[in-house]
Image (cartoon, grey):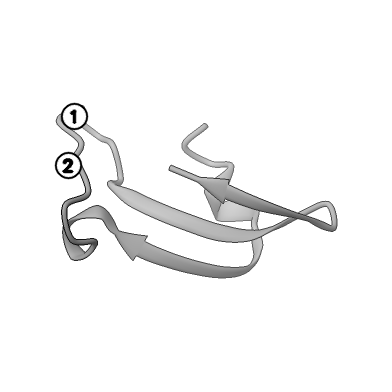
Amino acid sequence: MGGLADVLKDQMAFNYKDIPNFPQSTVDGHAGRLVFGMLKGKPCVCM
């Protein structure tokens, strides 16, 4: 799903490290971002 967040319209993204008490990703290559946006006219959140 790595590329899915990139195609969201009207994105608002937050780094996990900037969200208080949010767990950090330990997977190599994981972007570590919470991305809100629109996908085909529907609200969507990608992690």
Tell me the kind of residue under disc 2: Gln
- Residue 19 is left or right of residue 40, and the answer is left
Q: Residue at x 83, y 52 (%)?
A: 40
Q: Position of residue 21 (x, y in %)?
A: 16, 52
Q: Which residue is mark 2?
A: 24
Where does residue 9 sit, x and y in percent of width and height?
A: 68, 65
Query: Farthest top residue?
Result: 27
User: Contact (CB < 8 A) between labels 1 and 2?
Assistant: no
The type of residue carrying mark 1 is Asp
Q: Residue furthest front?
A: 21
From the viewer's perspective, is residue 37 above or below residue 2?
A: below
Q: Residues within 10 Å of mark 1 (few under 14, many from 20)?
A: few
Secondary structure under badge 1? loop
Lateral position of residue 35 relative to residue 25, left or right: right
Question: For residue 28, which numbered disc appears in the image?
Answer: 1
**Quarter holding residue 41:** bottom right
User: Mark 2, residues whose alpha carbon is within 10 Å: few (<14), some, or many (≥20)?
Assistant: few
